Amino acid sequence: MAELVAQPLSIAAGEQRMIHVFDLDMRPEQARFLREPGALAQVLGIEDIDLDHVEIFPVSDLEDLGLVGYLRDGCGIPNEQLASDTQKLTAIEGYVLLLRSRALRGEETRLTPARQIRHIGGYSEVGADWASLPSHPDDTPDSAKLYSAPRPAPREARSRARRIGATIFAIVMALILFAVLMLAT
């Protein structure tokens, strides 16, 4: 059984929009095995984990973007948060584990990773600014309401639909006539 680290990592109950980055110091086949049900939970020292919110991949897959670029551009983590760990993040050469808070289902969790799994840091994803949204539906601008675009009068809409239908019919008939004439010659 894998040796556990001396300092476990505590994840608070209700933690949201956090990504914990781990360096996986193991052979590629071992890292790929962590995607199997139960394997990752076991090496993290927990009962269960939602693998839909976990990423395990070789850093080389990121090519020129790199891990820092992926966390910034792909995960929405601000540069300010990544600045202090840039050296550690760029030093990762093998596989990496990205563990989103949702993987732990909002429960207080104490991770005791195996010795091959080194926690690099926890980073907050930038979320949407919900404060700018109106607090009451009546405060919503007309342009943001569903079905608020001006609609043509029913008679005008039917007339437009007939013109479009007639045009399509004429084009199809012309193509059929052209095909018949080509086959006849």
Image (cartoon, grey):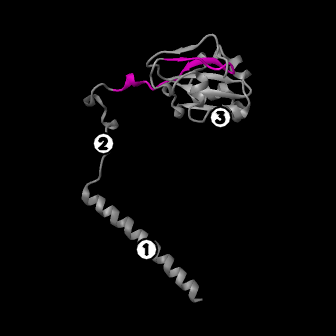
Spatial CA span between label 1 and label 2: 34 Å
Is 46 in front, or is 32? 46
Q: Position of residue 100 (x, y in %)?
A: 53, 26
The answer to whether residue 63 of the structure is visible from this angle is no
Q: Secondary structure at mark 3?
A: helix
Q: CA distance from mark 1 to mark 3?
A: 61 Å
Report if the CB atoms under discs 1 and 2 are less than 8 Å apart.
Answer: no
- Residue count near mark 1 (Cα–Cα under 10 Å), binned few <14, some 14–19, many ≥20: few
Q: Residue at x 58, y 13 (%)?
A: 8
Q: Which residue is mark 2?
A: 148
Q: Amino acid at mark 2?
A: Ser
Q: Earlier in the sequence, mark 2 or mark 3?
A: 3
- Magenta-colored stretch includes residue 131: yes
- Whether label 1 touches label 3, CB < 8 Å: no
> Quick one: which residue is furthest to the front in this view?
1
Where does the magenta region start and end?
109-133
Residue 29 in percent (x, y) is at 71, 35
The x, y position of residue 16, in whole percent, is: 47, 22
Quarter the N terminus occupies:
top right
Point out which mark residue 33 bears. 3
Task: Name the residue: 31% across, 41% down.
Answer: 146
Q: Indicate which label's residue lies in the foreground, 2 or 3.
A: 3
Disc 1 element: helix
Q: Which mark is residue 170?
A: 1
Q: Which amino acid does the dot numbered 1 rest on?
A: Ala
1 or 3: mark nearer the eye: 3
